[in-house]
Each structure stands twice: as structure tokens, then as C-alpha cells.
Image (tube, rainbow, N blue to C red):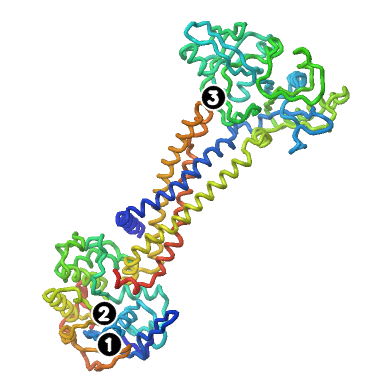
Amino acid sequence: MLSYNLRLAFASYRRNPTLTGLVASAIAIGIAVCTITLTLYHALSNNPIWWKNDQLYAVTIDSWDPERPDNDKHPERPPPQLTYKDALALLKSDIPMRKVAMFKSTRVLDSGKADVKVKRMDTRVTTGDFFRAFDVPFLYGGPWGAAADQGPEPVVVISKEVNEKTFGGINSVGRTVRLDDRDFRIIGVLDTWQPAPTYYDLNNGSLENPEDIYIPFAWGEALELESAGNTNCWKSEQINTFKDFTNSECVWIQFWAEFSSKADHNRFQSWLDGYAKDQKKLGRFPRPLNNHLYNVDEWLDFNEVVTKDNRVLVGLAFMFLAVCVVNTVGLLLAKFLSAASLSGLRRALGASRRDIFQQHLVEVIVLGLAGGLLGLIFSALGLWGLRLMFASDFDQYASLTHMDPTMMGAAILLSLLAGIAAGLYPAWRIGRIQPATYLKTQ
Amino acid sequence: MLDMQGIAKIFRTDLIETHALRNFDLKVEAGEFVAVTGPSGSGKTTFLNIAGLLETFEHGTYRLDDQDVSRISDDQRSRLRNEKIGFIFQSFNLIPDLNIYDNVDVPLRYRRLSASDRHTRITSALDIVGLASRMKHIPAQLSGGQQQRVAIARALAGDPKFLLADEPTGNLDSLMARQVMDLLEEINRMGTTIIMVTHDPDLARRAHRNVQIIDGQVTDYKPYEGPYEPSAIIGVTGERASG
């Protein structure tokens, strides 16, 4: 009976192509709006390194003002960054498998080539564990080791894009680039890497592009590099020199730790509490003990990467879909009632109410799926439009605005549900018609 | 075969109550060809709809093929319509975008018959009405008389106990009307009971018995005097049916 009902469905579409097109379009528009919104929401709420959710932790210590918390809305939360001296102290712990102390800065890159423009570029000043802790892929070479961190050695890792623009995409490992007034030897070239959101440093937003240049953390102090991210201070301190700054209570260093086991995680938490208690004895950390290790999911939540606005937008998108479904109910009623005489005839010839209901339900399910496919095309066009609008500002939008298979599956499922939701009443209604009423008008 | 006793059918609106049938009694025996006549609005079509289980009624009892069908469920009515009753309408009521074969197939689909069984019945029914060669045509490609013959084939394909015809020649010219009547008489001779509503006294005279309805009541009723002996009783499937 299913194949028969499918044949009847396609005959019905041919009989009334305009109304059929309107129904499919109404579903498609609702699906497209939902899919676009969900794609963005999905990308923002995505954990780009989910497989390390039990290993990788952002480290926080509450070194803030005794009079007021760092975050008035969430007084229980410690500041999201560390002071320089605390970061150095934490780097000395041998409990974590990997330790990443880092901040964002900028450097002027000069490749020494006349045809490549000298350009100021975002630079991440970080310990070498950054690359392995965050599973950053390399195209050529690899990360620097502990010796380069301690030196510090003049080594640099560049992004794939910088390598292409500066060296035409060849293996540039071993070559030298000049960063401001110092030469650095390239030891690695990154492959494409676009974590979305940029969970490892959310100071400047969650849709930042990863940096172009990476140099050892110790160069920060050696070259007296300033942070290009957020620097927050609560204490009135005399800061006249870079040394004053690194000794201050200002927080500006992001710190991550990767553990090989839950036991190490717990040990490090105890170690951290012990460190904070020691500092209290030295007159620091006036607030109650409040040190936390946040995994990536918790960190995204801590930084409110998915804002209330995003959630409201998703809600509005679904409300819009509901409006489309309600409109579709009306269109389907009009469509079915325009062919009520045929249903009346079928009833007279022996079709039960259930037969007529099933026939029309198959019709709306197929129509819902067609609307879903059309909605996917609309969604792709909408996301393409978003990319055109924002790609120049943030390359991240390119990755954010691509539909993944999950979203495609969700769109098809949504269209199926929308089709059924829109078609249930009209199909039921047409099944209830009295056959005698329509036989004379057939 | 069909036995209605004291049937009443009332149509109600907010303002008006119309008694379409009142204290309606009629008995039709197996193998009869009954013509039902009466002026417009007398209740002929209402009678036919109730007889065909297309409408319910307020009072009275209706026995169809020895089964009381007065208060059966909608599903049971659908099944009985499908298995025991064939309909022939004035305006043919064919589905315009289905070909002749698929039109005849419609009631058989709802009986959940196998594809081969359906095919046998469809070709046999179209053979009887002389349209086996036109089964791939759509209704618009046929004349009015041919369309009515397709409707008759559709009714016959399900091997019904009786045919209900509502002005079957009303939309046909006289030549085609005669052909359709000849066909109905032939079907009746083969053993199918026929009740035909008509305005045409000439057609009514060709039936075995006339029943006149005025103001929702039978006013000219001649009881069946049987036994009626059909010349042959052959179903669509070609099997000999019991008489």
C-alpha cells in the first residue's frame, strides 16, 4: 500500500504544482532558518578538542581583590588568567604531563624577501607544550622542546598561510625570518588549524583566528613583549619597568595543564591549593582559597561562549519554523480540500478513514522531505551569504558557516517532523469527510 | 438482499429541519432490477446513499444481505461498500489523472488483493464492458458512454452483490444511454441485483419493478413476486456464483 500511496502522492503533486511548491517552500524556509541558526549555535557550542575533555584543563587561581570578586555576576569564579610570577611557579610543577603558559602578542615579520611585504602579525608566545597539548597539526617540522623554552632559543613556528605567502608553500623549516629586530629559525610549519571556538584563549572573543607566529614563552620576558590580549589589575602598584609588570598582581597569562590520569589531576589540584596557601603566608591571595581546573567544556561555559542571545536566537528560529508549520497546515488543508471529491470517491469505493489518512500522511511526509532538501539548499545559500559578509573579518566564519553531517541530518529530521506536524490535522480532517457530500460535485 | 424498515433521515441546519426520508420501507430481493423514480428533492438520492452505506439515518432498521447494518461502525461500512456494493454515478466519478486500468483498480486496492488477482479482475471487468483495449487511456480520452462503461467496470471488478446506479444515463445522449442500459440489463441477467435511480420513465420501464418516492416515502410500491430466475449468474472472476 505504501508504493500505491507514493504513486498517489506524486499524482497529487502533479495535479496542483503551485500549492505543492508553496507547501514545500514554506517548510524549506522554516528549515533553512533553523539550520542556519543551529549551525552557528552548534559551531559555537562545539568542543573542538572533545577527545581530551578529561585530560586538558585551564588552570585558575583566585589572586584577586579581597574587596570584590573578579566577576560580579559570578563571584564564585576566579580570574580566568594568571599573574606572570604564578605562571612561572606553576611551570615548575612536574605533575602535569604538559604545561602551557602563554599570551598573545604581535611581531613584525620580515622574511628578507623584497617581494614580500613586512607585516605586523599576531604572535603567540607560549611554551612548546602548546602544540602537543592542543593537538596542533604540523605540515613541516615540529614543535620546539624544553631546551628551546629554557634558552630561550630563537626558534619559530609559522602558520601554513604565512608559509604560503612568504615561501610559496615550500618546506621552509631551517630558514630564517626576522621578527622585529631579531632573527628566528623556522622549526615548524603548521597545517590548517581552525579550532572553533578558539577555546585556548577566549580573551578576545571566541571567533578569533589562530596566530600566525609562535615563539617560546621565555622570549616574552627577554624581549619585554606586551600582551595583545587582556591585562587586568586590581591592586594599585608602581609599575615603571617590565620587571615591575612581571612582578605585579596583574593577570595576563593563560595557563593550561594536561594530565595523563585523574590521579595526576587530583594531585595537581592539591599542589595548587598548597601553592596558594604558601602565597597567602607571604601576604598574597587575600581572598578565600578558590583554585579551579576547568576542562574545555567547563571553560567554554565559564567564558560564556554560547551567550544567552545565541540561545534566544535558536528559540526564535524554532518559533519561526512553528509559524511556517502553521502556515503549511493551512496550505495543506486548502490542497487536500480542493481534492476532497476524490477522497470522497475513494471512501465511497471502500477506502476506510485510516486508508485516506495514511494516503495523505505519506503525501505530507514526502513533501516534508522535499521541503527539507530544498531547505538544505536555502541553508547552504544562507551560510554562503554569511561567509561573504564576514569572511574578510574572521576566517573563522568560513569554518563556522559550513554545515556538517550532523546538521544535515538534523535538517532532514526536522523537515520530517515539520511535515508530519503540519500534515497530521489536514490528513485527519480529510479522512473524516462524508463521502456522499462530495460525490455529486466530483 | 436489501430490507429497509421505517427509515427516517433528517437533515438539520440552524434554521431548518428537512425530513429527507420518513417511515421509509423497501425490500429488494436478490437478482432484481429496481428502478426508483420520483420528482427532484423527493429523497431518491438520500435513499441511494443510505442503501450504499454512504450516509447514516436516524430511525429504522436496514438489513443488507441478511446482516443488520443499521448501527455498524464506519470501518465496517467501508468494508461492506468495498465488498458488496458497486456504485455507478451520473457524472461517472472517474479519477481524471489515473488511466482506465488504475481507475478500475481503486476499489480493489482497498480490499488488499494480490497484484495478480487485481489484474485478473480488472481485465475481466474491462472485457465485459468492451474496453479492454483502452486500459491505458485516461478518462478525458474517452466518450461519455465509454467513461460510464469504465465506471461500470470499476463497480463490477469487486464482484458486488448489488449495483446502485444514480441516474447512470443522465449525462449521456440517447444512443449511449441505450448502450449503457443494455449493459446494465446484461449485468442483471448475469445475477447482480441493480437499484437504479432515474428521472427517465422509458428507462424505468426497462426495470423489473418501479418504486416511486415522493416526500421521502415510497408511494407506489409493488412487492416482489419472485422467484426471479436470472438466465446466468456469472461473476467477474468468471466463476459461477450461487443463485
How much space separates mark 3 and mark 1, taking CA atoms? 86 Å
Residue at which label 3 appears: A193
Q: Quadrant of the N terminus of chain B?
A: bottom left
Disc 3 residue type (three-letter): Trp
- The residue lying at 58 percent from left, 14 percent from top is A120
How much space separates mark 3 and mark 2, taking CA atoms? 78 Å
Do the residues under discs 1 and 2 have CB atoms within 8 angstroms?
yes
Disc 2 residue type (three-letter): Phe
- The residue lying at 74 percent from left, 38 percent from top is A73
Residue at which label 2 appears: B162
> Which residue is outermost to the front?
B15
Q: Nearer the viewer, mark 3 or mark 2?
A: 3
- Are dots 1 and 2 on a single chain? yes
Q: Quadrant of the C terminus of chain B?
A: bottom left
- Please state the horizontal and vertical placement of residue B36, each as a whole percent of the image: 24, 85
Residue at which label 1 appears: B28
- Please state the horizontal and vertical placement of residue A143, each as a whole percent of the image: 60, 16
**Most foreground residue, A99 or A182:** A182
The quadrant in which residue B61 appears is bottom left
Q: Identify the secondary structure beneath mark 2.
A: strand
How much space separates mark 1 and mark 2, taking CA atoms? 10 Å
- The residue lying at 60 percent from left, 9 percent from top is A179
- Please state the horizontal and vertical placement of residue A425, each as a whole percent of the image: 46, 62
Q: Is residue A54 left or right of residue B178?
A: right
**Most foreground residue, B123 or A435:** A435
- Are dots 3 and 2 on a single chain? no
Chain letter behind tag 2 = B
Q: Is residue A175 left or right of residue B46?
A: right
